[in-house]
Amino acid sequence: MFDRDIWQEIFNTIKKNKLRTFLTGFSVGWAIFILVMLLASVNGMQNGFTGQFNDDATNSIFVRPGRTSKAYAGFEAGRRIQFTNEDFEYVKQSFPDDIEYISGRYFTSTSARYKSETGSYPVQAVHPEFQIIEKTIITDGRYFNEADFTNKAKVAIIGRKVAEDLFKNENPVGKFAELNGLTFRIIGIFIDEGDDNAERRIYAPLSTYQRIYGNTNYINQIALTYNPTYDLSKALEFSSRLEDLMKRRQKVSPEDQSAINVWNYAEAFDDISSFTAVLKAIGIVVGSLILIAGIVGIGNIMVFTIKERTKEFGVRKALGARPRQIVNLVLLESTFITAFSGFIGLLFAWLILSLIGPSIETPAFSNPSVRSSTVITATIILVIAGILAGLLPAIRAANVKPIVALSDK
Amino acid sequence: MIEIKDLHKSYKMGSNSLHVLKGINFSVEEGELVAIMGSSGSGKSTLLNILGMLDGADSGEYNLDNVPIKDLNETKAAQYRNKFLGFVFQSFNLINYKSAVENVALPLYYQKVNRKVRQEKALKYLEQVGLREWATHLPSELSGGQKQRVAIARAMAAEPKVLLADEPTGALDSKTSYEVMDLIQKINDAGNTILVVTHEEDIAHMCKRIVHLKDGVIVEDKKIEQVRAEQYV
């Protein structure tokens, strides 16, 4: 196999049969090229869709109060439900095993001022654990901690845009800014990938805001992440338990759909997952069909080639070639051609992907790429198929009696 | 060199069986130049194919250089062919994408001769057939006579015990035929054993012995006065 002579023979044959070699190689290279592009496109779509959801932890649940739509337990319909710190603590105590992180959320807005710069920004007053639930990325400084929360410290974390607006070229961390006329210390800056608007936001401790603004214990929303070991069915079961509990506590009819809204990411994510799974399956099916087309193409050309060369093989046998040498010659040649042109197809696809891939960045499509293992597997399959396609005709050709091959009368 | 006893061969043609060789007894000494003659269907090509181990006999004995040739598998047959026999065909059967010298070197490749020696030997044999300057040409660039000379050089390159030529002049005009026969005679003069299958009288008379085949049996086997081809060239 690593005999230099046989390779010389093969290169000789290839050199002297350029068109045939090109045709064989082209069907292989083309199949690999299409396969890679197809898998990359499916991957790109998948990346695009999951990218839309990656902003938050994928195991998060949001509980929002609304208005009742049914009269229940002596209350009229249309009653507004309001969560409080007590509800928050109650949820937290009720599901110690199910909950990973939990935070209250209080939405408001503020006018902010630093030196002569002013602006108006939405504020989210939350618990420290909210950083993990929202996957907030701190680029400078820190998030507020339990101590800040307990002390109702007047600290704030501002988004990158807020920092640009108010502080211009100064580093905001450690500076004091005025929020709604009160002095807050800026302790951190965060960024949000993919969403500029989220960077115009300010985070502050919930306790601080509840004390400053009306001394309430109101919460607009409860955000939590469930135990990450849970699978989808367990996650859904937990969110329905959570919903039942909140409905009982707020004296809401179990049938009431609008009073309490429990929004489970897993559910939405499951839809996306099954969608991309279908896409992937389609990709694999179409990809294998193309592979089969490529294989049939190789087989076709191999049969034709060997038929064409039967006489040559007969001559070679008359000159003392053993059948195995004939088979080896044909197989090595076809394997070399398939592997080489498969590699060329691969290279082309990779080149195109790396040239145009990064510039495609839409919500539905991003970073089209394939795992190299997939591609290598496909190439190996194709090469093996090429060998198999060549094997049968090669063996048949090698076993043709030279007399039959040479008979020209 | 060659010893054949009671050789039989038949071909199945659908339900009929065609008895082509009906008991051939025949021997060839070293250094002979034998013409096997016969009209088409006489079995001469079949005999040559059996002699060349390209085909197997149904029954009978065949010894080549005191080696019994019987029940060979493909690999063994290939080895023997390579070691004992050189072939020259009517239609030359050069490999059309290989140059003259590559064609001549091919049997040496199957003898596992190393590349350098192969090249040298091939060129030497091309020189002998007078085609050294055509070494790098493809068969398509050669005339019929030149092609046959390349084929003879190829057959000789393996230094076989016996050279088998199946209608070597069948596809050539008479002038080129004589050139080829001249070459064959010279190779025979050097001591090589050669069998020529032909149906042309003049070609047969350029050999030293004529074996006449008819309907699968030898009807005549005589030594003759060789006509030298040189005088016609």
Image (tube, grey):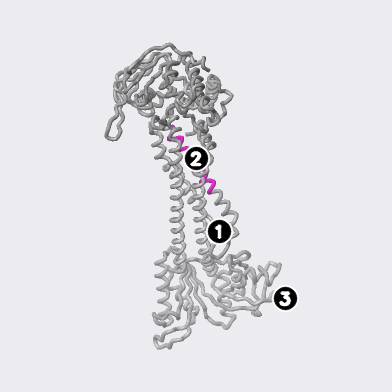
Q: Chain of mark 1?
A: A
Q: Which residue is mark 1?
A: A367
Picture disc at residue B15: none
Q: Which residue is mark 3?
A: A116
Quadrant where the C terminus of chain A sits is top left
Q: Is residue A305 above or below residue A244?
A: above
| Residue B204 at least partly seen | yes
Image spot of residue A152 (x, y percent): 58, 75
Callout 2 amino acid: Phe
- Image: magenta residue range: A325-345
Mark 2 vs mark 1: which is more N-terminal?
Answer: 2
Callout 1 amino acid: Asn
* Magenta highlight on residue B135: no
> Considering depth in this image, is B30 or A341 the residue closer to the camera?
B30
Callout 3 amino acid: Ser
- At x 47%, y 40%, the residue is A334
Image spot of residue B99 (x, y percent): 54, 29
Q: Is residue B12 above or below residue A22?
A: above
